[in-house]
């Protein structure tokens, strides 16, 4: 089975993957926790970066046999983030993340906004990153180690390792999986609608930090006014 524990913004604080554990070799499968730390939304305004505080729980909006829908919101430095998300019966967690000024239509400029998904490094052994089929490449291999083992935070992967970019701006990759033979986490999206990409700045990176392999999505890469709301859609699925 899959279990998603959510914060007030309806982003996962922890994900448990326990399906078929009775069939796995004893002592090899490890513990069910997939994340090394809660997912976080980092907002940079005026050169200062702060995590969007999302303590609490989301609101359950709808419940059905095959789907549960939740909503959430949080604010930081004049920026409001709100979500509508739903968990399907197969464990796919669909997220619609809307970024806007905390005051309707008021100017609110951010330097950048990043979404970080910190996975346990012991699980993130392999990486499968697919670009756009038929137009660009992919990366399937071990997740690279840090070139400098002493580095506290080291970028070990970016979309350039998938080959030439096939998108108009930036180098967005629509499907990224990290995991091992027992557990993993798939992130995917149809496109980068709502993002603010920029040539010369990677859309995504994987960073090793301590016991975590962090999938970083640079949702907004250049100074951007959020007086008009923008919605970003993606899916997280434990495997």
Image: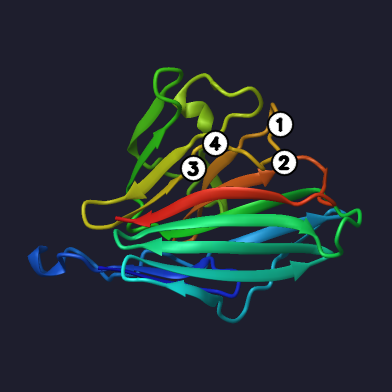
Which of the 4 image quadrants contains residue 191?
A: top right
Q: Which mark is residue 198?
A: 1
Reading the image, the residue beneath label 4 is 191
SS at circle 4: loop
Counting residues from the start of the chain, the first of labels 1 and 3 encountered is 3
20 left or right of 239 in image: left
Check if mark 4's residue and mark 3's residue have beta carbons within 8 Å: yes
Structural distance between the alpha carbons of marks 4 and 3: 5 Å
Reading the image, the residue beneath label 3 is 189
Structural distance between the alpha carbons of marks 2 and 4: 16 Å
- Position of residue 63 measured from the top left corner of the image (x, y, whole percent): 41, 74
Above/below status of 101 relative to 218: below
- Position of residue 16 measured from the top left corner of the image (x, y, whole percent): 33, 69
Counting residues from the start of the chain, the first of labels 2 and 4 encountered is 4
Structural distance between the alpha carbons of marks 1 and 3: 18 Å
Assess disc 4: are there few (<14), some (14-19) or many (≥20) residues with their C-alpha within 10 Å of its C-alpha: some
Check if mark 1's residue and mark 2's residue have beta carbons within 8 Å: yes
């Amino acid at each position: 089975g899959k279990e998603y524990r959510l914060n007030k913004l309806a982003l996962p604080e922890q994900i448990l993957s326990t399906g078929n554990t009775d069939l796995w070799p004893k002592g090899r499968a490890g513990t069910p926790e997939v994340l090394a730390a809660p997912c976080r939304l980092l907002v940079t305004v005026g050169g200062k970066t702060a995590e969007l505080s999302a303590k609490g729980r989301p609101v359950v909006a709808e419940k059905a046999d095959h789907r549960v829908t939740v909503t959430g919101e949080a604010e930081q430095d004049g920026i409001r983030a709100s979500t509508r998300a739903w968990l399907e019966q197969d464990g796919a967690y669909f997220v619609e993340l809307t970024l806007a000024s905390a005051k309707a239509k008021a100017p609110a400029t951010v330097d950048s906004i990043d979404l970080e998904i910190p996975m346990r490094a012991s699980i993130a052994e392999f990486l499968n990153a697919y670009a756009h089929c038929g137009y660009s490449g992919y990366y399937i291999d071990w997740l690279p180690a840090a070139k400098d083992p002493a580095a506290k935070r080291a970028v070990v992967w970016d979309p350039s390792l998938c080959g030439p970019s096939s998108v108009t701006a930036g180098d967005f990759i629509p499907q990224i999986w990290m995991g091992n033979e027992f557990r993993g986490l798939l992130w995917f999206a149809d496109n980068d609608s709502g993002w603010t990409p920029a040539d010369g700045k990677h859309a995504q990176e994987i960073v090793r930090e301590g016991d975590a392999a962090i999938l970083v999505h640079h949702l907004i890469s250049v100074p951007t006014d959020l007086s008009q709301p923008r919605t970003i859609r993606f899916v997280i699925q434990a495997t």
